[in-house]
Amino acid sequence: MAHADYKGVLGVDKNKLFDAIVRYEDYPQFVDGCTGVKVERKSAGHARVTYQMSLMKDFSYTIDLEEDREKGTVSWKLVESDLFKTNNGGWKIKESAAGKVDVEYEVEVDFKIPVPGFILNRLVKGSLPAMIKGFEKQARKL
């Protein structure tokens, strides 16, 4: 199992970053490897989303998400996947200064197929900085 986290300050508005995170259908525009998204169910504070991905292999996964704009949190748990055994994590966003936010992102993944630890960690941790930058850039567009 691999675990990755990010803690830092981004130069964006809290609500715009939150919007970028919860507009799942926009992910193919800025998340590397994301080729499709289907929001199956969405109500206030809840969503079930299926992602189509292409990262060395084509695969999909479905997660249930809990969203709390006031607290600045989004968390998810894996429902099903043809590749993942585990994919759980979340975002925590809080204002730090005018136009800036403190961001915490955490993810834990495990695969159904054997993956050497060094490859697993590289996949999970190696892509994290670019992904965070993608969300920051997307938030600035909103």
Image (tube, rainbow, N blue to C red):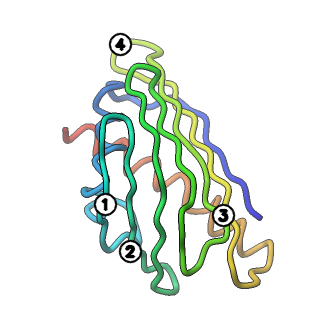
Measure how far apart labels 1 and 2 are at the Cα level.
Answer: 13 Å
Q: In the drawing, what numbered circle is on residue 97?
A: none
Q: Is residue 110 left or right of residue 90?
A: right
Q: Residue beneath label 3, please?
A: 86
Residue 4 position in % (x across, y down): 68, 52
Q: Residues within 10 Å of mark 1 (few under 14, many from 20)?
A: few
Residue 7 position in % (x across, y down): 61, 35
Q: Nearer the viewer, mark 4 or mark 2?
A: 2
Measure how far apart labels 4 and 2 are at the Cα level.
Answer: 36 Å
Please determine whether, in this image, residue 28 is positioned above or below residue 74: below
Q: Amino acid at mark 2?
A: Gln
Residue 62 position in % (x across, y down): 46, 65
Sequence order check: which comes first, mark 2 or mark 3?
A: 2
Residue 111 position in % (x across, y down): 68, 75
Contact between labelled residues 3 and 2, with CB atoms less than 8 Å apart: no
Q: In the drawing, what numbered circle is on residue 98?
A: 4
Which quarter of the rendered picture does the C terminus lie within? top left
Sequence order check: which comes first, mark 1 or mark 2?
A: 1
Measure how far apart labels 2 and 3 are at the Cα level.
Answer: 16 Å
Q: Amino acid at mark 1?
A: Glu
Looking at the rendered structure, the secondary structure element under dot 3 is strand
Q: Nearer the viewer, mark 1 or mark 2?
A: 1
Q: Residue beneath label 2, please?
A: 52
Asked whether 7 or 75 is in front, the reply is 75
Q: Image quadrant of residue 26?
A: bottom left
Sequence order check: which comes first, mark 3 or mark 4?
A: 3
Sequence order check: which comes first, mark 4 or mark 2?
A: 2
